Image (tube, grey):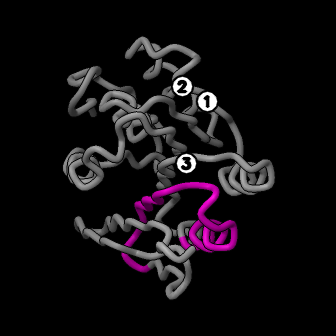
Amino acid sequence: MRVIAGKYGGTALRGGKGPQFRPTAQVVKGSLFDTLGDEVKGAVVLDLFAGSGALGIEALSRGAARAVFVEQDSTAARALRTNIERCRIDDAHAVVHRGDAMRFLERAIKAGSRYDIIFADPPYASSLGAKLAAALEAAGPGICRLFVAETGADIAFPEGGALEKFRTRKFGQTIVTYFRYSEDA
């Protein structure tokens, strides 16, 4: 597992071990960032269920201004911190929070926090991707510009609200769904 492009391109990232650890495949990560393009430059990103931090670190490598990582598992959080150190990313650009991603998002919404892009890669067997989308729908456009969810094939997202799905890509059992708030929101 490596950073694909940008300032940290080619840097090897440490992964976790065990069945709970499922790193984003390189082809998925490459497609995701090709889709986002220049949206990443200067962005403040929130990487929920961060694991090794591959998505947030890739965003920083491609010009994001800051990344906030949220990871509950202690082993994955150690790997994440190691990866941030390997890339020599300072505390002003990368912040790691160890804890529950849903609770973090709920607190961020209440505090009026603002992110440009929110990445979420919850466990595939859970419905957390849909719950996150519902929370972002209820929060309105003040929380972020874009929400990108990497989920298993059987996740149903809410539709018809201010948070609009604008693209879906399937890679085997992995589905990447992109959302943005409608112009009317």
Q: Crowding at label 3, few (<14), some or many (≥20) Cα neighbours within 10 Å? A: many
- Dot 3 corresponds to which residue? 49
- At x 46%, y 14%, the residue is 85
Q: Quadrant of the N terminus?
A: top left
Kind of residue indicated by mark 2 = Ala
Magenta extent: 130-154
Labels 1 & 2 near each other (Cβ < 8 A)? yes
Which circle, 3 or 2, is nearer the viewer? 2
C-alpha distance separating marks 1 and 3: 11 Å
Find residue 99 and report its horizontal and vertical position in percent: 71, 42
Could you tell me which secondary element the residue under label 1 belongs to?
strand
- Based on the picture, tell me whether residue 37 belongs to the magenta stretch: no
Could you tell me which secondary element the residue under label 3 belongs to?
loop
- Dot 2 corresponds to which residue? 94
Q: Crowding at label 1, few (<14), some or many (≥20) Cα neighbours within 10 Å? A: some
Could you tell me which secondary element the residue under label 2 belongs to?
strand
Closer to the camera in the image, 94 or 113: 113
Instruction: Note whether 175 is above or below 28 in the view shown.
Output: below
Which numbered circle lies on residue 96?
A: 1
